[in-house]
Image (cartoon, rainbow, N blue to C red):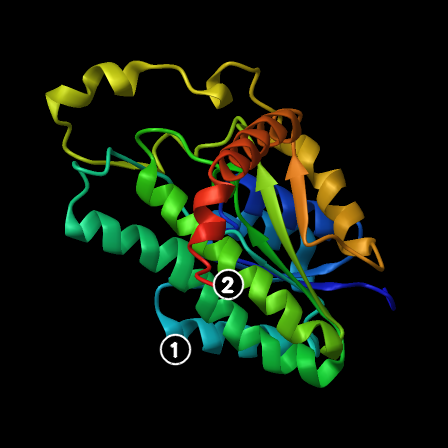
Amino acid sequence: MANAKVWFITGSSRGFGRIWAEAALQRGDKVAATARNIDSLNDLVAKYGPAILPIQLDVTDRSASFAAIKKAADNFGRLNIVINNAGYGHFGTIEEISEKEARDQMETNVFGALWVTQAAIPIMRAQGSGHIIQVSSIGGLTSFPNVGLYHASKWALEGFSETLSQEVAEFGIHVTLVEPAGYETDWAGSSATHSQPIAAYNEIRSRPRPTTSVKRGDPKATATAILTLVDSPEPPLRLFLGTLPLPLIKERYQQRMATWEKWNDVATAAQGN
């Protein structure tokens, strides 16, 4: 297929990564699909043959991430789309989180995406085109109790990716932060990790969050949105997925604006001249 796009997707074994990889393959695109265990991709290899390139990858390994990107580009001749999907949720209040849990969360969700992004940029810059898609979250724009380090990782992803978008635009490279709400994936299931609980937080932990008050989305329904996104000549910097994010974020940002306005006299006085 002459106009087939070449995708590189991390975390392709399940969830969004798996769904988007298959959607791309179904329409005739080519996919370098990474996973910690590439046996999980055997059925896609059997079905789509050389259109899919399975690559074993732990995104926290910087040199391995660079090697994986190079392997994909060498195999398919270019890279049109890179999706940093690999990541997981960690549950625990700030007091409960151990040093290892905190570092592991940031290593995967922030540094893993950073290494893959850094590896892809020179290739896309040489091409004069490309689209880097960072899988963030509604939790990259607001926060809830018991997932503080997850939020920290997504806010960090949002920060460096927004800066990146300004740095690479003149090279023809687009950057999009995809921000899903709650979906019926394994994010809160076996792929999640949990801190040792402190009883003092049990009541706070049991309170419902806005994301649990609405029906969780069907992850398969996101495939059309992602295909529309990658086909757009002017993709947005941010794209919500689901019905919850827009009303919730409008409410949270209105609260922020009200606070900033209320305290503006203090802020202005701090100018000092």
Is 79 drawn above or below residue 24 in the view shown? below
Asked which quadrant contains residue 201, the reply is: top left
Q: Residue at x 32, y 44 (%)?
A: 149
Q: Which amino acid does label 2 sit on?
A: Phe
Do we see residue 74 in this rendering?
no
Give the label, 2 or 1, closer to the camera.
Answer: 2
Residue 91 location (% of width, % of height)? 29, 34
Q: Mark 1 points at which residue?
A: 63
Residue nearest the viewer, comparing 220 with 263 = 263
Q: Where residue 144 appears, x then y in whole percent? A: 39, 30
Which residue is under mark 2? 160
Q: Residue 134 in the image: state x and y as whole percent.
A: 57, 55
Type of the residue with mark 1:
Ser
Q: Quadrant of residue 73?
A: bottom right
Please tell me which of labels 2 and 1 falls first in the chain: 1
What SS does tag 1 mark?
helix
- Image quadrant in which you'd find residue 215: top right
Disc 2, disc 1: CB below 8 Å? no
Outermost residue to the bottom: 126
Is 250 positioned to the left or the right of 12 in the image? right
Residue lying at 47% horizontally and 77% vertically, measured from the top left: 66
- Position in image of residue 100 (x %, y %): 18, 52
Q: In this view, does 207 lie above or below 147?
A: above
